[in-house]
Amino acid sequence: MADFLAHFRKDLSGQPIAIQTVSQHCHSTAQYAAQALKPVHLSAGGYLAGLVHDAGKCTASFQNYLINQIGQKGSVNHTFAGVRLLLERYFSTDAGDFSSVATELLALASGEHHGLFDCVDERQKNGFQYRLTKADIGYDEAADTFFRVCASPEELDHWFHTALEELTPVLEHICSMTGNEASDERYEQETAFYSGLLSRLLLSAVIEGDRRDTAEFMNGTQFPAPPSDEILEQLWSAHLRQMEDHLDQLPQDSPIDRTRRTISDQCRRAAEQPGGVFRLNVPTGGGKTLSSLRFALAHARRHRKQRIIFTSPLLSILEQNAAVIRDYIQDDSLILEHHSNLVKTEENSQQLDEQELLAETWESPIIITTLVQLLNTLFSGKTTAIRRFHALCGSVIVIDEVQTVPSKMLSLFSLAVNFLSEICGATIVLCSATQPCTEQIEHPIHSPIPEIVPYDPAIWEVFRRTDIQSIGTMSLEQVSEFALKTLDSADSLLIVCNKKSQAEHLYSLLKDGDFALFALSAAMCVAHRRDRLDKLRNALEQNGQKTVCVSTQVIEAGVDISFACVIRLSAGMDSVIQAAGRCNRSGEAGPGVLAPVYLVQCQNESLTKIPDIQRGQWATQELITEFSAHPEQYHNTLDSDEAVGYYYRALYRREPREHRDYSLKDRPSLFSLLSLNSYCTQDQPYFFRQAFRLAGSLFQVFEENTTDVVVPYGQGKQLIQDLCGEQAGRDSGYLRSLLEAAKPYTVSLYQYQIDRLNEENGLIPLQGGALGLSGHYHAETGFSIDEPDLEFLWR
């Protein structure tokens, strides 16, 4: 066979019109993978892994499968050959340097490009050994042909030795990242964990190269090259000047205005420091979004960073922060918002799902995304998530409301932050008014973590606008009565609940009152929720119009809205302080006046199904007891730094040790699977023993498995129609633009809701593997699987 094909492109009638050889594809993939790893000086490793990743396509059986469609989709093995070629040529148990570890890293990056595999699985099967000994995959034919048509043995040797030179200092650094005070077990655990992240980084570059080159060939287009360091420096400089000119025009009349400027100026000065991990601990209302943007732009310019990534825990915060960032950047072409996963892909270890070519990549200079997407990039097993990992290198990553990182994954998160800052050259900014005490956990973020804005009582006092008061235990009926009483002296009230059933009941108790009553629901798409918030803000601005909003945590963190009074059902102190941030936000109550935030213990409340909230509530009660005995030690306020620190220490004491390692029922923790792997009980010849595939399949930021669906709200109705059309089926560029436009018109549905809608023909299959909702969406409630008068949806 003269040409061994990797892909071929068809016209609309299904006839082949262009071919791409294995050699062409492997070399292009290698070049793109090398380019992706340039910021961390690991280009040779990316090049070599990309070069051999499709060596298994150099067989007659694969060519028959590809050209003549002989065999089922993904039935011909092509990913084992590259692994075997590298291991047979470069692995040795007698190696005195890092060459064998480097070989395993490159083998993983090559062999996992269509899906992770377990180095040691639950049955003690070794993934490397399995790929070395697997029969009937045509390995000898593939290797001989690869050396003949793709790359010579000498070329491979050159790239391997160059890759080893690059990887050796990185591996040495990893060995030194766990402190001298660590136990032998902790040292081995963390070294293995960091090495696993390094394998993920190399793999992400191979996936990027493979998918990018495939998309370019299949679409007959060329993606734009990434901007050079010089162009990026000019870009950051221009937008920093533009932002600072805009800031200079802001009023400086009030103490709040002047203090916000002080905070912003401190962020600007801190941006000159070398990269690493920073805390931005700013009071609610202190202008955190603008200050962090100014830091990010100045730091990116000073240190030639590749991109700036902002994460938010909730879509409502993302939408709000995105509006602020767009207003100051004033160039939408530089910004990517990524929060919805409309494109659904299926993992197949031997076959590319072409839907992957439509999935989001993080190649834009400025990324605005959710905490969920960031954590998936770090730990999910999906190749669409892994592909984004290299984009974190050489970036400024601003993590807003960092206290919302689920406590079950604090070990994973903290170690990933260490890896990103020390190996990937990323600068991490941890933003919150209630910073978690990560130094208290077993696997902490490396300390000390410098404060961008050092604590200054004078700064915090300016933004002290509320008084958090614990008022004991009440039933929901008593809470509603208390709410009505507060309206005698307050024009507006926010009630925040722990459970949707509580919010639903309170809403029904208050619905006949003589005031405007609102509720916010995660069953609404972003566009709908934005409209709802606008109406709520308008109501709050009406003189003489009393307004009440009943909500769960969806309103708490970062939503720019202000009420005269807040009632918060008891929860973790971080949640309580966030709820307080929605009260007297701009000092509307008058100079020096502290608006009340009432903390209520709900009678007969059962939180067994939401243990994180329960543990937070217990820690808050412990803090309240301590505060009542010694208020002077906490500056007479429950939201002081000292009070927050006491709360987190109490919280961590109440959590089981293994909880923060992402404990799993009847399995080792996720941290174990990604480090020493408890399933590995026998001696292995290889350094890597992690159960990568198993861990990736088990990882979920939240317990529920959800699917994003386009809803018929506003423009969403037309988008559903367009996504069903012929043009979307044949024009990938048009399809991508529709999927981008559909993001604000999506809701996340649980699997049981998807199953029921499928039974009722309530879902519409859309081009690109997306789903649209047929009906079941109402102007007041958003998504409802039932009739609108039977159920009000909450979250």
Image: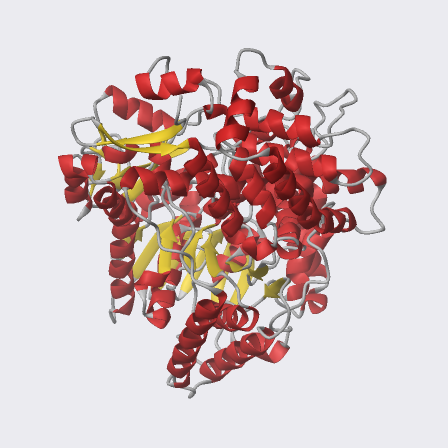
Q: Is residue 656 visible?
A: no
Nearer to me, 750 or 416: 416
Q: Residue at x 64, y 59 (%)?
A: 644
Q: Is residue 679 above or below residue 303?
A: above
Q: Quadrant of residue 726?
A: top left
User: On the rendered structure, is 787 left or right of 190?
Assistant: left
Q: Is residue 585 above or below residue 121?
A: below
Give the color scheme: rainbow, by chain, secondary structure or one colour: secondary structure
Q: How many callouts does the rendering have?
A: 0
Q: Residue at x 85, y 51 (%)?
A: 180
Nearer to me, 190 or 400: 190
Q: Residue at x 26, y 23 (%)?
A: 758
Q: Quadrant of residue 505?
A: top left
User: On the rendered structure, is 668 left or right of 475?
Assistant: right
Q: Residue furthest bottom?
A: 253
User: On the rendered structure, is 89 left or right of 775?
Assistant: right
Residue 493 placement (x, y as % from top left)? 37, 60
Q: Quadrant of residue 11?
A: top left
Residue 793 placement (x, y as % from top left)? 32, 39
User: On the rendered structure, is 633 left or right of 320?
Assistant: right
On-image quarter of the C terminus: top left
Residue 328 placement (x, y as % from top left)? 36, 72
Q: Is residue 37 above or below residue 85?
A: below
On-image quarter of the N terminus: top left
Nearer to me, 41 or 785: 41
Residue 561 placement (x, y as % from top left)? 37, 64
